[in-house]
Amino acid sequence: MSDIKKTRTTVDIYGQQYTIVGPESASHVRLVASLVDDKMREISSLNPNLDTNKLAVLTAVNAVNDYLKVKDRIERLESEIQRLKE
């Protein structure tokens, strides 16, 4: 059995309630849900005819794109730090 304590948090994303269970704090889960909700509303305002499924996919694509950009930036900064140490 896992010794990791799991937190159960209910959040609202784009008018739907979700119960999320995981090791993160409730405040962290609420922050993530709020950011997802904000991004969905932003995309929806630019594309009001999108159905919820397409809106969710575009939101996920945007999130992964942002993640990859940040990951790339971190890798470049780590390389620069390593270069400066040598």
Image (tube, helix red, strand yellow):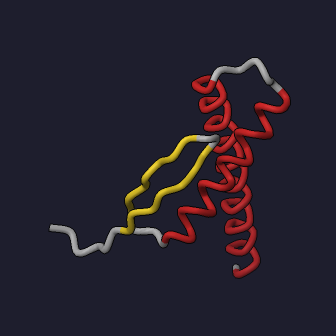
Instruction: Give the residue at x 72% y 74%.
Output: 81
Residue 71 x/y as whole percent: 65, 55
Image height of 68 relative to 58, above or below: below
Image height of 86 relative to 53, above or below: below
Q: Nearer the viewer, residue 84 or 78?
A: 78
Image quadrant occupied by the N terminus: bottom left
Residue 39 x/y as whole percent: 73, 44
Residue 16 x/y as whole percent: 55, 41
Q: Nearer the viewer, residue 2 or 39?
A: 39
Image height of 66 relative to 62, above or below: below
Most extreme residue toward the top, as rendered? 49
Image height of 51 relative to 4, above or below: above
Most extreme residue toward the bottom, as rendered? 85
| Image-quadrant location for residue 73 | bottom right
Instruction: Give the residue at x 58% y 62%.
Output: 30
Instruction: Give the residue at x 66% y 55%.
Output: 34
Most extreme residue toward the right, as rendered? 46
Instruction: Give the residue at x 51% y 46%.
Output: 17
Most extreme residue toward the left, as rendered? 1
Q: How many marks?
A: 0
| Image-quadrant location for residue 79 | bottom right
Image quadrant occupied by the C terminus: bottom right
Residue 56 x/y as whole percent: 61, 32
